Amino acid sequence: MENELFGRPGRYAMRVDVPARGARLDLDGLGGDLRWYGLAWLWRLRILIGRLFGERLRLHRPDAVTVGSTVDWWTVASVDDTHLVLHTDQWFTGEAWLGYRIEDGVLTQVGALRPNGVIGRVYWWAVYPIHFVVFRVMARRQARRSR
């Protein structure tokens, strides 16, 4: 999954300069709080909208970020010292991936969605401009926390 996600980045990809050790420590501390996503109020709205469609997303911080552990509504699909890939199939709109790679002092953040039917595609296109802002904020906050 890592090569697929990073080799052909989806619609949302951001890159920021970071100290590698700080970025790794930041990724190990994800979950349990909407602030790590940036624009927490938008995520609260997204969670509320999801409840209308039967989603029950919950925040959760694992003791350790390892394959199979739960980070909020994400499952850790792949992780090592240079990357982290999160996956969820809990969204009514489809399956989503959120990936991070740390390489040569650059943190690359990539998001992808495999839409579920018409409603998934409508959602994907409706939030397209919002995701550009959210991803930029997430990347900048991660860079700041890494320092």
Image: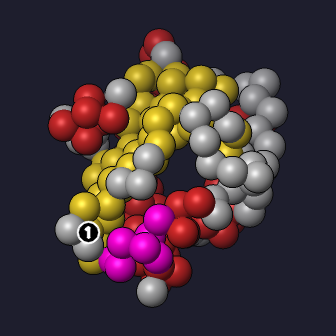
Query: At label 1, which amino acid type do we have?
Result: Val
Dominant SS of magenta comes to: helix
Question: In the rendered view, would you say 40 is above or below 70?
Answer: below
Q: Give the range drawn in magenta.
A: 18-24
At a point 64% along the width and 63% down the height, the residue shown is: 29
Where does the image place residue 6, in percent across and percent down from the top left? 25, 41
Where does the image place residue 71, in percent across and percent down from the top left? 67, 46
Question: In the rendered view, would you say 86 is above or below 113?
Answer: below
Q: What element carries label 1?
A: strand
Q: Which of 1 and 82 is in front in this view?
A: 82
Q: Is residue 5 magenta?
A: no
Toward the top, the furthest residue is 117
Does residue 92 appear to the left or right of 25 in the view shown? right
Residue annotated with mark 1: 106
Question: In the rendered view, would you say 27 is above or below 76?
Answer: below
The image quadrant where one finds the C terminus is bottom left
- The part of the image, by quadrant, that contains residue 102 is bottom left
At a point 44% along the width and 22% down the height, the residue shown is: 115
The answer to whether one can see residue 78 in this image is yes
The answer to whether one can see residue 127 in this image is no
